[in-house]
Image: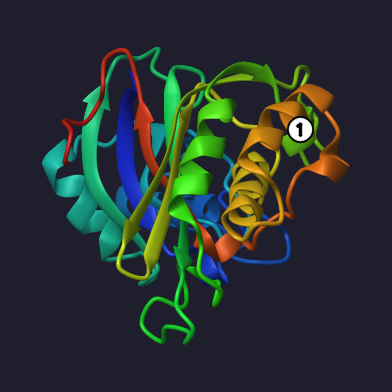
C-alpha cells in the first residue's frame, strides 16, 4: 500500500509558469514530479494546495503525493533538493493520513503582497516586490483594509476568466505593515478568487496614493463592479506565506 507524503515547499516564481504543469514552460508541479520520479524510481502525481500563477512566489506551499518508497520522511527533502533547480526548495516532508489532500483539506491561506515604497528602486528585492516611488499613506490603507474583512461577495476583486462557482469568500484578516521602505499587505482567508489578492493590493495601493478614499472601499465591495476597484498589481510582489489545516502536517516554523 502506498504511503501519503506531504511536502512544504518554497519557490521563486520569477521564471516559473505557476504551480500547475504547463506544456510550454517550467512549473513547480512539473519540477517536483520529475524530482520524485528520479529519487523513487516511479512516477507520482503531486496535489498542490494552490495553483499559483506565473511569477507568484511561495514561502509555505503544501502539496502531497503517494509513493511506495520507504525512504524516511526526514531524508526526502535532501533527496528531492538534489534533483530540483535552484528556484524550488523542499523545506520539510511528513507522512500524513491516507485521506489527506493538500487543497481539499486546507481551511485557510495567507498571502502577502510586498511593495518597495521608496523614490529609488531596489536592486536586491526587485524580484519579490513592486516598486512604488510615491509615498503611501499607511494609515489610510489600514482604514480601508477594515472594510475588506468578513464574508463578502468579492466580484469587484475578481479578474475575468474565473471559473469559481461562487465569488463569496471570507477574509479573516487584512493587515498593512511598513518596515522602512518595505510595505506588506497580508491577507488571510478561507479561499481566494482569480487575481483577488493582487486586485485587493492594487485597490489599497490606490487608497494609499489618494486615488480612492478609504470610506469608498466598502461601496466598491458592495458594488461587485470590477471597474471600481484598483488595478491588478504584477505577480512578482505576491507570495503564498502559509496554509492552515485542522491537523497541520508541519509544525509552525518548519
Frontmost residue, 169 versus 47: 169
Decide: few, some or many residues near mark 1? Use Cα within 10 Å; few <14, some 14-19, many ≥20. Answer: many
Q: Give the image's coloring scheme.
A: rainbow
Give x and y (percent) for residue 233.
Answer: 65, 59
On the rendered structure, is 17 left or right of 35?
Answer: right
Q: Can residue 180 be seen in this view?
A: yes
Give x and y (percent) for residue 164.
Answer: 76, 25
**Quarter-wise, where is residue 161 in the image?**
top right
Q: Is residue 177 above or below residue 88?
A: above
Give x and y (percent) for residue 137.
Answer: 49, 57
Q: Which residue is drawn at 44% across and 17% down?
A: 105
Q: Which residue is drawn at 66% across and 66% down?
A: 25
Frontmost residue, 252 versus 37: 252
The residue at which mark 1 appears reads as 220
Q: Can residue 161 be seen in this view?
A: no
Q: Is residue 79 above or below residue 121?
A: above
Q: Which of the image's four quarters has the C terminus?
A: top left
Give x and y (percent) for residue 171.
Answer: 52, 24
Q: Which residue is drawn at 38% across and 32% down?
A: 243
Q: In this view, does 39 lie above or below 65?
A: below
Frontmost residue, 110 versus 74: 110
Q: Is residue 236 above or below residue 254?
A: below
On the rendered structure, is 235 left or right of 7?
Answer: right
SS for dot 1: helix
Q: Residue at x 78, y 34 (%)?
A: 156
Frontmost residue, 254 versus 238: 238
**Quarter-wise, where is residue 218 in the image?**
top right
On the rendered structure, is 227 left or right of 33?
Answer: right
Q: How many labels does the image show?
A: 1
Q: Which of the image's four quarters has the N terminus?
A: top left
Amino acid at each position: 500500500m502506498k504511503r501519503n507524503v506531504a511536502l512544504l515547499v518554497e519557490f521563486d516564481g520569477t521564471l516559473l509558469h505557476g504551480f500547475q504543469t504547463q506544456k510550454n514552460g517550467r512549473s513547480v508541479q512539473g519540477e517536483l514530479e520529475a524530482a520524485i520520479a528520479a529519487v523513487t524510481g516511479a512516477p507520482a502525481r503531486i496535489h498542490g494546495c494552490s495553483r499559483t500563477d506565473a511569477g507568484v512566489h511561495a514561502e509555505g506551499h503544501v502539496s502531497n503525493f503517494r509513493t511506495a518508497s520507504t525512504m524516511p520522511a526526514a531524508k526526502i527533502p535532501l533527496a528531492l533538493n538534489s534533483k530540483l533547480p535552484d528556484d524550488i526548495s523542499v523545506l520539510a516532508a511528513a507522512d500524513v493520513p491516507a485521506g489527506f489532500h493538500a487543497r481539499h483539506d486546507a481551511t485557510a491561506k495567507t498571502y502577502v503582497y510586498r511593495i518597495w515604497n521608496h523614490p529609488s528602486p531596489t536592486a536586491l528585492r526587485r524580484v519579490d516586490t513592486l516598486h512604488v516611488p510615491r509615498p503611501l499613506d499607511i494609515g489610510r490603507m489600514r482604514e480601508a483594509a477594515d472594510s475588506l474583512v468578513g464574508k463578502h461577495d468579492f466580484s469587484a476583486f475578481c479578474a475575468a476568466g474565473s471559473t469559481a462557482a461562487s465569488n463569496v469568500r471570507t477574509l479573516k484578516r487584512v493587515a498593512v505593515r511598513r518596515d522602512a521602505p518595505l510595505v506588506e499587505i497580508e491577507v488571510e482567508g478561507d479561499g481566494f478568487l482569480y487575481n483577488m489578492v493582487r486586485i485587493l493590493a492594487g485597490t489599497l495601493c490606490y487608497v494609499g496614493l489618494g486615488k480612492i478614499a478609504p470610506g469608498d472601499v466598502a461601496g466598491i465591495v458592495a458594488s461587485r463592479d470590477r471597474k471600481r476597484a484598483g488595478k491588478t498589481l504584477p505577480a512578482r510582489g505576491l507570495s503564498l506565506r502559509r496554509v492552515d489545516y485542522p491537523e497541520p502536517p508541519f509544525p509552525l516554523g518548519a
